[in-house]
Image (cartoon, rainbow, N blue to C red):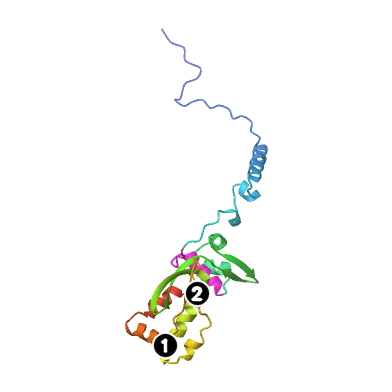
Amino acid sequence: MSRKTPTSLSTGSKSRTPNRNRDYRAEYAARISRGLASGKSRSAARGHPRAIDLPTAGPSPVNRNDPREQALRLMRQGASQAQAARTAGVTVEQLRRYREINTTSVRQGRSWIIFDTRPQTFWIATDGRMKAVTLANDDGSAVGRYWAAVSEFLATNDIGYLQRVTDEGVRDINGRFWRFELRPNVLRKLDSIGELQFTEIYADVAK
C-alpha cells in the first residue's frame, strides 16, 4: 500500500518567522533621545563617541616606551599631530585620544603647546643626598636644567654654572618642596662616590 508523498519535506531546519516590520528611523531617534537624556553628546549617543566623550583617565605614570608618548614628545618639539603620529607609527586618532585624555593642549597654528601634569619620578640631589621625587611631568624641565648646570660645573669646576640656576628646587605632587643641592663641595663629594651617574639621570629627565 503506497503512502502519500507529503507536499513538503522537512529539511531539518526550523521554519523562519517572517520579520516584523520595524521602524528603524523611530528606533534610532529613540536611542538618540535616551543618550541625550543621560547626558551623552549626540555623537556618543549614536555609538560613535569623540575623544572628548571618552572617560577621562586619572593621572598615571609616564611610559616613555609607548609610541604615543614618543609622538607627544615630537609635538612638544614642534611637529604637527599628523607628523608625530606618522613618525611614531600610530594613527592620528589614537594620538588625539591619548593627548586629550592625558594632557591639556592648545593648538597655535600648526604647533601645539602641551601641558602635562601626569606624575613622574625624577632623581635630584637635595640636602647632601640623592632623592627620587615624584613631580608633575612638566616640572621635569626644571630638573633637566638643574642637572645640566651640575654637569657643566663638574666638568669645568666653574661655580658660575651653579650660580646661574634660577630654580631653587621643585615641589612634589604632595606639595613638599625639595631644594636643589648647589653647594660645590657637596656635589663634588657625591660625584666622587659615584652617586652622580649622568647617563641614568639624563634618561630620567629626557623629554
> Residue at the location (60% across, 71% down)?
113
Q: Amino acid at mark 1?
A: Pro
x and y, in percent, of residue 65 in the image: 43, 66
Q: Earlier in the sequence, mark 2 or mark 1?
A: 2
Q: Which residues are magenta?
A: 61-77
CA–CA distance in space, label 2 to label 1: 19 Å
Residue 30, visible in the rendered structure: yes
Nearer to the camera, 186 or 63:
186
Mark 1 neighbour density, 10 Å: few (under 14) some (14–19) many (20 or more): some
The residue singled out by tag 2 in the image is 170
Relative to 52, is 207 on the left or the right?
A: left
> Residue at the location (60% across, 53% down)?
53
Q: Which mark is residue 165?
A: none
Nearer to the camera, 107 or 177:
177
Q: Amino acid at mark 2?
A: Val
Relative to 72, is 28 on the left or the right?
A: right
x and y, in percent, of residue 175 in the image: 51, 68
> Residue at the location (63% across, 44% down)?
38
The residue singled out by tag 1 in the image is 184
